[in-house]
Each structure stands twice: as C-alpha cells, then as structure tokens.
Image (cartoon, coloured by chain):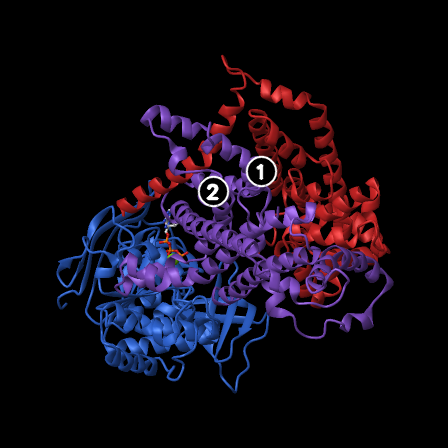
Amino acid sequence: MNSVSSVADTAAGPVSTGPVARVGGNPFRFLTTLRPGDILAIAPFILFALLFLVMPTLGLVVGAFQDANGNFTFDNILQLGGPQIVASFWISIRVSAASAVLGALIGLAIAMAIIRGRLPEFIRSSVMTFSGVASNFAGIPLAFAFLATLGRLGLVTVLFKTLFGFDLTRSFNILSFWGLTVTYLYFQIPLMILIIAPAIDGLKKEWSEAAATLGATRFQFWRHVGFPVLWPNLLGTLSLLFANAFGAIATAYALTGSSLNIVPILLYAQIRGDVLHNPGLGAALALGMIVITALANVIYLVVRTRAERWLK
Amino acid sequence: MKQGKLWSWVIFILGALYFLVPLYATFDFSLHIRRDHLSFDAYANVLNDPRFQAAFSYSLIIGAAAIVVGLLLVVPAAYYVRLRAPHLRPIIEFITLLPLIIPAIILVFGYIRMYNTSSLIPLLGTNFGSDVLLTLAYVALALPYMYRAVDTGLRTIDVQTLTEAANILGANQATIIARVIFPNIIVAVLSGAFLTLAIVIGEFTIASLLNRQVFGVYMQNVGANRAYEPSALAVISFVITWGAMGMIQLLARFAPKTARLD
Amino acid sequence: MAEEFLRIDKLVKSFGGIPVVKGVDLGFNKGEFVSLLGPSGCGKTTILRMIAGFERPDSGRIVVEGNDIAHLQPNQRKIGMVFQAYALFPNMNVAENVGFGLKIAGMPRPQREARVEEMLKLIGLSGYDKRFPFELSGGQQQRVALARALAPSPRMLLLDEPLSALDAKIRVSLREQIREIQRELGITTVFVTHDQEEALSISDRIVVLNAGSVEQFGQPFEIYNRPQTKFVATFVGQLNTLNATVANAGQKTVTVGGATVTIPSLPATLRDGEAVALTMRPEAVSLADGATRDIVLDGKVAEVHFLGSVIRLKVDLGDNAISLDTFNDQRTPPPPHGAPVRIGIASSDVLVLGN
Ligand SMILES: Nc1ncnc2c1ncn2[C@@H]1O[C@H](COP(=O)(O)OP(=O)(O)OP(=O)(O)O)[C@@H](O)[C@H]1O
Ligand SMILES: [Mg+2]
C-alpha cells in the first residue's frame, strides 16, 4: 500500500513546495553546460523514473482508451458507469472521505492538545514519536490488530459482552464501511498530527497576544486568526489523507477479503483474474484512480504553497 | 484557562486509548492460543514455520537490495541537483513525489502490462527478473523518503565548499562523492534506509501481484487460515516498525546540528 | 506632580524560583513617554507583559487611573501593544489588521473604514490598505502594527523593542515618527529598549533597570548628567575614570596627577588617603590652556577617532587613560598620534560614584 506516512517531514520541506509553483525558466539550459560526470550522475535516476514510474502509468492511461485489438475507443471509459464499478467508487470515496475528515479533525484536536494544551513536554514528544511509528504501521498487520480488538472474538467485543451484556457486533461490524474507516484512522490520525504539528507551532504566540490586547477573546482569536491561518494546511492535509486512503488496499484486503468492494480491491481482483472480463476496463479503472488521487494531491500541493507564502 | 487544560487531558487520554487498546488487544489475543493458559506458542509457531523464515529473509534481502539501488540512484542525483543544476530541482522533486501520487496498485498494474512475458523487456518471464522488478518497485515506493532524507543530509553540510576543497586537492567527481560527501551524509542515508525498510518489510500489494512470497504475502496467508498467529505477526510487525523508526530517532541525535532551516 | 496615570507598586515576579523583577516602584503621568532601558535579561519585557496582563505578578500592584487592574484579562485592559516581531495577522491585509480591534469592539463598517483610513494616514501608509503583511518591508509592517494598536484608542501604549528588528536608518526615522504620533495623540506610552541613544532621544523620562531593580528614574538630561549609580553612569553614555587619592575628605580635596584639587561632589564618607575614582563624560574634558580648568593633566595622544562633527581623542596620562571629545574645527587639524597634549577638566563636572 501507498503509505504516505513520513511525508510528515516532507510536507514541511522543499519537496512539497516546488513542483507546482516553481517550474519555470528553461529546464533544458543545463544541456549546454553538461559534463560527462553530470550525465552519469543524473541519467540513471531519470531512466529509472521513466521506466518504473512514468511509462507504466502512461501505459495504463493509453490502455484505458484501447480495445482488445489496440484500437482507440471510449468504450472502457463509458463502462466505468456500470453499477458494480460506480458502487466501488462510491464506497471508496466514502471511506476515504470519512477517514480523511475524521482523521483530520481528531488529529487536529490531539495536536492542539499536546502543543497548546499545556500538557507536560514529554507527552508531546512521545506522541510525535508514536505518530511516526503508527503512520507507518499499516497494511496487513493493522487489519490483524483491529480484528483482535473489534472482531467477533476481539478484546473490546468480548469485554462489552461480559461487562455490559452488550453484543457489539450487532451494531458494529468491523467488515463494514465504519469498520474500515475506524481502522484507517489508525494511520490517518498520526499522519495528520505529523503534518499539522509544525503548522500549529507556526502560529506565533504574539498573534494571540496581539489579538488579546485588541480586545479579542480566545474564541475570537481562533475564529479570525488561528483557524484561517491553519485553514490552507487543513485543507491540503485533508486531500493528502484522502489520497492516502483511496490508494490503500492491503488493510482492507486483509480485513474484509473482498466483501467490501473498494476500487483498489476490485482492481486487484481484475489484475489477478480479469473479473470484469475486459482488460481495457481494468486500465480505465486504474485511470479513474489516478485521476482522483492526482486531483487530491494537486489540491494538497497548491494549497500548501499558498499557505507557505503567508507564513514567511 | 484551567478548563482548557482539562480538555487537553481528555482528548489526549481518549486518543491514547484508541491507539493503545488495539496494541494491547493484539498482544493479549496472541497469548491465548492455548485454551487453559497464556503462552507464547503462537510466536513459536510462526517463528518455527519454514515458510515464515523463507518469506522474512526474502523480504529482508529485497529490502536491502532496494536500499542499495535506491542510494545508488538518489545520492548522485541529489548531489548533482544541489551542486550543479539547482534549476532542475523542481523537476527532480516532482519525480520523487510521483510515488505518493500514483498508488502502488496502479504502479504494479502498469509493470505487469509493461514487463510481461510477451513484452519488449520480459522481466516477469523469469524468477530472477521478477525479483529485480520487485526490488525496483520498492525503490520507487521508497523514493520520496529516500530522496528527502539524502537531500536534507546534503543541505546540512556545505556541499559547495567541500567539493571545492576536494577539487583543489585533485580528487575527481567520483572520489568526491565516495570519500567526502558520503561520510558526511551517512546519518541521513541510514535514516532513509531504515524508513525504506519500514515501508517495504510488510508490503503486500505489489509482491502479491508479482507472485513473490514476501513477508506481507505470508502474513496475508496466515491471516486467512489461522486464528492466533496473525496477532503474533501483527505484534512482530509493530516491533519491527517501532525498531526502524526508533533507529531513525536515534540517528537524528547524531545528525549534524547545523542548518536546520527547513 | 499631578495625579499619576499608571502606578506600579512593589512589583515582584520570579520564574521557576529565580527572581526576575525585584520590587519595582514606578509612577507615570498621563501623556508621558517613558522608556524602560536596561541590558538584556534585566526584566523589561516581563514588566511590560505584567502591565499588559500576560504575566501575573507574584506580588505588588499595577494601578491605572486609580484602579487596580490585576483582575482584568489582557483583552479587558484597553492597552495597545506593539511587538518586536511585528506580529501582524498574516491572513489579513493592512486594512483588516488595523481594523481588527474595531471589529472586535463591534464598530459598524463605515465608521471602521473611516478610522482605518485615518490611522493609515497617520502612519503615512495611505493606499496600502489592500497589501498583505508579506508584501511589506519590516519598517512598514511595524508602522501597521502601531496603527493597529492605536486604532481602538487604547488608554495606554506598550512597545517592546519595536525597532530592534529594523536597520539603523529606518530605526532612527521610525522612532521619530513614533514619538511624533505619540505627542499628537497624547497617549501614555511605555517603550522598552536596550539602546541608550534611542531612550535618550525620544523619552520624556527613562527608567534604567538592572537585574530586576530600578537604578534610576528621571529625565534624559538627569540620567545622563547626574547618574546616581555607577551602573547608570556606565550603561548610559561613555565614561572616563581617573584614579585619585583623597587628600582631605572634610575639605573635599583629592590629589590627582600631582596636583590637589577640590571636588564638590566628593562624598563625605571617604577617609583621607583612600583611593577614589573620579569619573567624567568625554565631552567634559577639553584640550586646555590650564588657566580655565581646575584639573590640568599632561599626556600623549594615543588614538584619534575622527567622527565628523566630533573628534574623539584618547589621551595616555601614564597611569590613567582618558577619552575626550572636541568639536571639529575646520581651520585646525586634530593633534597627531603621539603629540604631547595638556587636558583640562572642570572639577564641577567630576562625578564620584558609589557602587
Ligand atoms: N516565561 C519565562 N519562563 C522562564 N524564564 C523567563 C520567562 N520569561 C522571561 N524569563 C527570564 O526572565 C529574565 C528577564 O526576561 P525579560 O524578557 O523580561 O528580559 P528583557 O529585559 O526583556 O531582555 P531583552 O532585552 O533580552 O528582551 C530573563 O533571564 C529570562 O530568561
Ligand atoms: Mg525583552
């Protein structure tokens, strides 16, 4: 799965700022001053990117517009409108959106609590360290952990039954939309904490003090200054979390098998055994995923660059 | 004011519960394989399983190979972009971001179409070819983190000055990278390596679709067929992730303290 | 003295058991411009923050217009504040920043806009209302911050080293502008700085602080010319020291450079034969023809610093060295390095400082 995990520090740094904002000038100027050593340094990298990132993806994009004989067609794209695929996209979008929104809100609350809540310093550093680990703890083992917690024999389920005589599985099924969402939160919340913590740190103490001397209450400060300043970051991180969940498959696969047909699982089944009986449709499905995650990431990058302009 | 602090504690404790209960539950569950008493038998079953040993060592080997290949690709490129062609930076950085934008399942789908037995480069035709493809796929997955770690390392040292000093002493470019730059960024490089390991060790999607028996695929198999062993595996995975991230934290203490001007 | 606008009584504050403000007593008049001057870490910011309400005093009172303000939150105190790092709200343009306090106070939009316009005119930034902070220079940002603090008509203005992030030229012009605006509005102002020249040039009165205590409180002229402690004398301006011996404490005479002179400011507590340090400002020393001066000493020119309108000479007197300032004279070049010179000091300019 595509664990975006430690973009956390990426996010604060230059990796995330550049591409959208600063592609300018003449990038080919370097050709005129190239030395043999330079080519050796950069050629393998570029070649790798072409062969293992760009071309495989482009191949899928092209494949989405080809029929079995390689002729151009819109048919595959049109078939994305079929009920099974639409349902897949719908459940995927719902899970990704729910886990992104909840992850962002809860992550923000925790980040605020540990940074601005006057908790002991060691709590903050422990939470940050733990977030680094938890945001990387995804995929198959995460599914196992939640089965052991909220599954039919899970600790919490059993506790509820023995302590309150309450059967949790009646109202909550770990193999459902909410089950998957709650599980995804385990890496979404820490990711949010890692990304938003520097932004909260960036809120200067003087801003709230200046607001106070101007008569503002704490609430008014957050409403007019704190929240608006954080807003681009929140929005950007939200899209990042969305993309993160949307591309994830291993957790869902291990948790629900194929009972919850999110897009990546459908695509997985298609790659394994052409369950859609149309290879071109598989490529179209992939194209759909690419478009959605790319959109989310572009939003993230654009919003982020704007936010950084402010906070200079 | 007091109330704010109370709220912080409430939020923190609720959060801690959400994150710690599953860990405890998993550990607890993994000890219950015997009906009458607690035991570590689930762990013994896993660790003694030859398929576990094979899958885990295979994952480690592929992970190590991915780290080496990744470093060979990233270090010269990052160094070159910093020193000789800063104007290329946006392009290179965009490339390093691609694996975050393209989900792993898309990548592997593309690979299967591009490198199948009937293609120009039929990597998937042989076992070794598949191993190579898996390694390169993992290089791609880890690229954003690897590049970022190395680039940070390069930034903290004064690449320009070091290179000029080495040039004056008559060293050529390769020697500069191997003898001067590399030792200086070894800490950053190791962080990148551990991060790669953390990402790659439990990977499932790509390996499964390339039919490689890695640790992640083994875990999935066990999960489908056993009751208690999966929990033991989850605990083992968590410990590994924690170990890798812990190493990174530890390394950060040794990192040069200069220029943390992100 | 008229009724005091701000009264600070036995103010005490410590951080983690370390006393930072040690019983400060001060009274400021309405409309006065007072500087808190002192070295880094002496507690200036802490005092200011206690007035603003961001720190709670351990003990002591802060009284504004007769009312103890201890129970008031910072947002109830009606005190404007300007910070060293500008602290403009980054998400608001200039007009929104300046209008923020008015908006919070619930002023209707038309009046608010008029007031913002008026404030921008006051700080000379009319037409900048749509700019964002990151589009302004440091000096401009600080002027906006000033306008923002003044817009809601606070009863007092606090400035914490508002100029120290700016470069030297702007520093001087902005401090004059601040003083001008302050005069125009007649607002009681407390200005924190560690720059003595800044404090001397714009203040009505100066509080010199050292290690959490007030060393001296007075007008710039007094502070400079009649420093009451050695700390004030050395911290504010340059000071020369001449080593002398008390000849006759009762008659206030000392021996210096072989001559016996009367020093009117000699404390009566000294004993005959005791060593004493005579101090004086460089401008109180002149290249003299003996007759007009009480203390006359011979030496050699050790250094010549030509500063433009003023020439500072360092004169080596054997066991003493002294700096003296003379005005530039277009017709006479300064004495060359190593030239023998005779210097003179009026004994009434000499200060004898206890510790
Ligand atoms: N919140 C705090 N916690 C602990 N110590 C503090 C705190 N605020 C200030 N201090 C200490 O109190 C002392 C006085 O600080 P203060 O900021 O008032 O000095 P200052 O005179 O404004 O100095 P500067 O010119 O450097 O701004 C310093 O030693 C500082 O370290
Ligand atoms: Mg200060």
Q: Which mark is residue A254?
A: 1
Residue C210: x percent and y percent?
A: 35, 54
- In the rendered view, does C131 fall on the left or right side of B95? left
Q: Nearer the viewer, residue A10 or C39?
A: A10
Q: Which mark is residue C317?
A: none
Residue A179: x percent and y percent?
A: 46, 41
* Quadrant of res A169: top left
Q: How many marks?
A: 2
Give the crowd class for mark 2: few <14, some 14-19, many >=20 residues within 10 Å.
Answer: some
**What shade has chain B been given?**
red
Q: Residue furthest bottom?
A: C331
Residue C31: x percent and y percent?
A: 22, 72
Chain appearing in purple on the rendered image: A
What is the C-alpha distance between the residues marked 1 and 2? 13 Å
Disc 1 is placed on an element classified as helix
Q: Pointer 1 and pointer 2: residues touching (CB < 8 Å)?
A: no
Name which residue type carries label 2: Ser
Q: Is residue B258 above or below residue A255?
A: below
Q: Is mark 2 within 8 Å of ligand 1?
A: no
Chain appearing in blue on the rendered image: C
- In the rendered view, does C99 fall on the left or right side of A49? left
Q: Is mark 1 within 8 Å of ligand 1?
A: no
Which residue carries the number 2 mark?
A176
Is the residue at mark 1 from the same chain as the one at mark 2? yes
**To which chain does the residue with label 2 belong?**
A
The answer to whether residue C182 is seen in the rendering is yes
Give the crowd class for mark 1: few <14, some 14-19, many >=20 residues within 10 Å.
Answer: many
Q: Nearer the viewer, residue A28 or C139?
A: A28
Name which residue type carries label 1: Ala
Q: Nearer the viewer, residue C126 or A92?
A: A92
Residue C327: x percent and y percent?
A: 46, 79
- In the rendered view, does B207 fall on the left or right side of A79? right
